[in-house]
Amino acid sequence: MVKRQVNRLVTLPFSRLALRREKISMAQFELLPIEIQKTVKTHTRDDEEIKMCFLAGAVLLGPEYVVITSKRIIVLDVRNIGSLSQSYVNVKFEVPVSSITKIDTNRSFKNKLLGQTNISIQINGYKHLINNISNREANRAVELLSSLIAK
């Protein structure tokens, strides 16, 4: 019985974390943190429509927020400034959909175990990586980007 309780204590935080990630991963734009929303709004124009939002990267180390609009992909994260516990939003990359030349997905052994996929977006010889996305979201993102590129 003691072993059973220990197992529950060990798995409980991970199950909550997975549940929380699932709720946020299919996020509507309004559910993203306010700082992320403000930064995305400053990087987009009024004629752009937000098509998809999801989380990528390691949740424990701080997730990457990926926003796909009708004209671009924006990947952001939140970083802390030293011991001041001040944070700021960092735009890791912003890519116009029209300049994407190739989209690839790959899965390492760890990704297969965790049900995740990595997406690489190639633009004029440069490769931008979005790591550790859930398989379902990665497939939806690739389909969405392919349809936006075809337009």
Image: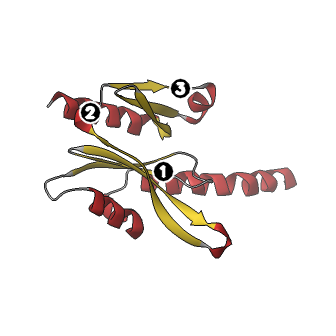
Identify the residue at horizontal 53%, vertical 26% (top origin).
107
Q: Residue under label 3, please give it.
A: 107
Distance from label 1 to label 2 (Cα)?
22 Å
Q: Amino acid at mark 1?
A: Glu
| Front-most of residues 80 and 151 | 80
Please tell me how crowded label 1 is: few (under 14), some (14-19), or many (20+) other residues with Cα within 10 Å: many
Q: Which type of secondary structure does the marked residue at label 1 adopt?
A: strand
Q: Residue under label 2, please give it.
A: 99
State yes or no: discs 2 and 3 in contact (Cβ < 8 Å).
no
Name, please, the residue furthest toward the right. Answer: 2
Camera-near label (1 vs 2) is 2
Please tell me how crowded label 3 is: few (under 14), some (14-19), or many (20+) other residues with Cα within 10 Å: some
Q: Position of residue 128 (x, y in %)?
A: 44, 35
> Left of 13 or right of it: where is 58?
left
Circle on res. 64: 1
User: To which quarter of the image does residue 113 belong?
Assistant: top right
Identify the residue at horizontal 30%, vertical 25% (top origin).
101
Of the numbered discs 1 and 3, the one sitting upstream in the chain is 1
